[in-house]
Amino acid sequence: MFVGCIIADPVVEMNRLVKEHSLIPDVIACQPQLVINILYQCFTEVQPGRHLSPLSVSREPIIRWLSDPNKLHTLAMIDPDAPSRSEPSYREWLHWLVGNIPGCDVVHGQQLAAYVGSRPPPNTGQHRYVFLVFQQFCQLDFDEQFIPADSYEARRGFSIKKFAAKYALGKPKALNFFLSNWEENDFY
């Protein structure tokens, strides 16, 4: 007897989860073509829609996506659920922003906002943390001031849609996301 198996297409599965978790229309208008590979400390891999503790994502991850090494990219990590999904008055909270990335070599990109891991406040439910990659058409001269890790005011009310429009980034090429909520035993 022959038993077949079906290998799920990761982009199809991610786009199903994008719809299920309402990232369309809350964050993006259309489905991306690629999944961003994200690896946190202790080999914690981000699978689309997976729950991760704030402690496990406290440090900057290793990021990869299928890209042409001769093209430049912009990477953003946002929380559209600040301070909560039911009351997102700070939408979006900017967690990380890097531009002029050669290929997918984030380390050699231009840091616009230092990485800050997920820090959902108590009693605000589950938050969606979304990574987006845009392919740039050329080297960009960003006029935003650098946001250090300890700066919070400059992070709230960020709009990835407005930022993408300002710099003619177009639609996101790649995406991934995880879910997280306040965990009392996490010390971050």
Image (cartoon, rainbow, N blue to C red):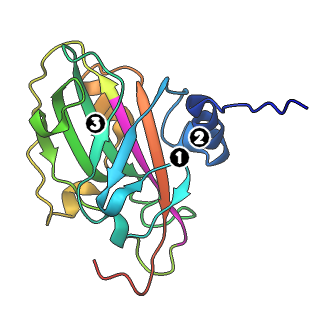
The percent position of residue 117, horizontal first and vertical second, equals 30, 62
In this picture, is 53 found above or below 177?
A: below
Instruction: Give percent across and percent down for residue 7.
Output: 67, 31
Asked whether the residues under the numbered discs 1 and 2 touch, taking CB atoms below 8 Å apart as contact, a structural biologist would say yes
Q: Which residue shows up at 80% across the image and 30% down it?
A: 4
Q: CA distance from mark 3 to mark 2?
A: 18 Å
Q: Nearer the viewer, residue 19 or 6?
A: 6
Label 3, label 1: how far apart the Cα atoms are: 17 Å
Q: Amino acid at mark 1?
A: Pro
Residue 48, disc: 1
Using the image as rendered, state which of residue 133 and residue 61 is in the foreground: 61
Query: In this picture, is 113 found above or below 125?
Result: above
Quadrant housing the C terminus:
bottom left
**Callout 1: SS:** loop
Q: Is residue 160 magenta?
A: no
Q: Which residues are magenta?
A: 125-133
Q: Residues within 10 Å of mark 2 (few under 14, many from 20)?
A: many
The amino acid pointed to by label 2 is Val
Q: Earlier in the sequence, mark 3 or mark 2?
A: 2
Q: Quadrant of the N terminus?
A: top right
Query: How far across and down, in percent of the image, does residue 2 sit?
Result: 86, 29
The Cα–Cα distance between marks 1 and 2, rounded to whole angstroms, is 8 Å
Find residue 154 and report its image quarter: bottom left
Residue that numbered label 3 is attached to: 75
The rendered magenta stretch, by its main secondary structure, is classed as: strand
Residue 98: percent from left, percent from top? 19, 39
User: Considering only order in the chain, which callout, 2 or 1, is on the residue closer to the N terminus?
Assistant: 2
SS at circle 2: helix
Disc number placed over residue 62 in the picture, else none: none
Q: Is residue 128 magenta?
A: yes
> Residue at the location (44% across, 51% down)?
46
Secondary structure of residue under mark 3: strand
